[in-house]
Amino acid sequence: MISENTILACQERSNPSLCQMVKTVTQYLPVALIGTIFGIVLTKSQVISWYRVQSMFRFEEAHMYLVITSAIVTGAISLWIIRRFNLKTIQGEPVTVKTKPYQKGVLYGGVIFGLGWAITGACPGPIYAQIGGGELLALVTFAGALSGSYLYAMLRPRLPH
């Protein structure tokens, strides 16, 4: 926790770098808490299970499809609420949802994403939950995701956008 002396130092502005650190920590603490809860939910719902992902891609059980459908419904309701009540971000800015035109690169990216998901059993969010849950092989998946992101950044100027 943040000590009383730290708060007093910030109020007196005697240590600006300490004040900035305290501000940063308190700003990202809710994000870390939400991320931790998200990881627990992913783990408890077995979304990070390689076997569940494989069963989904083999059409053997509906568990993952139901989880994905519930996420889509939750997202749709959330977007409706955000638009209906003109909610703002934490920084007080309006939330904007931009419609993007279809590009064939989306299809190629989706195929690559799906192949990676089928092979590793993880899409980007669950990788962190797998690592946090002690799945050491998820570090290889994480390295692959970073490598793919880096490769995309290098090739982006030459890709059809």
Image: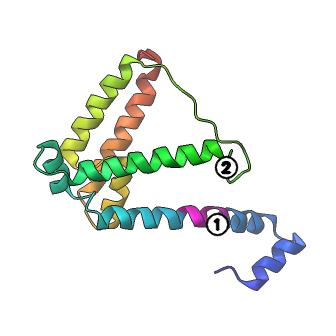
**Camera-nearest label, 2 or 1:** 2
| Magenta run includes residue 62 | no
Q: Which residues are magenta?
A: 27-31
Q: Position of residue 20 (x, y in %)?
A: 74, 62
Location of the N terminus by quadrant is: bottom right
> Label 1 sits on what residue type?
Val
- Can you see residue 85? yes
Q: Main secondary structure of the magenta part?
A: helix
What residue is drawn where x is 45% and y is 23%? 156
What residue is drawn where x is 34% and y is 55%? 126
What is the quadrant of residue 4 in the picture?
bottom right
Q: Are marks 2 and 1 in contact (CB under 8 Å)?
A: no
At numbered mark 2, what does the secondary structure look like: helix, strand or loop? loop
Q: Position of residue 106 (x, y in %)?
A: 37, 25
Q: Which residue is denoted by mark 1 in the rendering?
A: 25
What is the quadrant of residue 40 in the picture?
bottom left
Q: Earlier in the sequence, mark 2 or mark 1?
A: 1
Q: Is residue 103 above or below residue 8?
A: above
The local crowd at label 2, few if under 14, some if 14 to 19, many if 20 or more residues have their Cα within 10 Å, is: few
At numbered mark 1, what does the secondary structure look like: helix, strand or loop? helix
The local crowd at label 1, few if under 14, some if 14 to 19, many if 20 or more residues have their Cα within 10 Å, is: few
Location of the C terminus by quadrant is: top left
What is the quadrant of residue 47 in the picture?
bottom left
- Can you see residue 142? no
What residue is drawn where x is 37% and y is 65%? 41
Measure the C-alpha gap from mark 2 to mark 1: 18 Å
Q: Position of residue 70 (x, y in %)?
A: 36, 51
The residue most toward the right is 12
> Label 2 sits on what residue type?
Thr
Q: Is residue 98 above or below residue 76?
A: above
Q: Is residue 150 left or right of residue 97?
A: left
Q: Which mark is residue 89?
A: 2
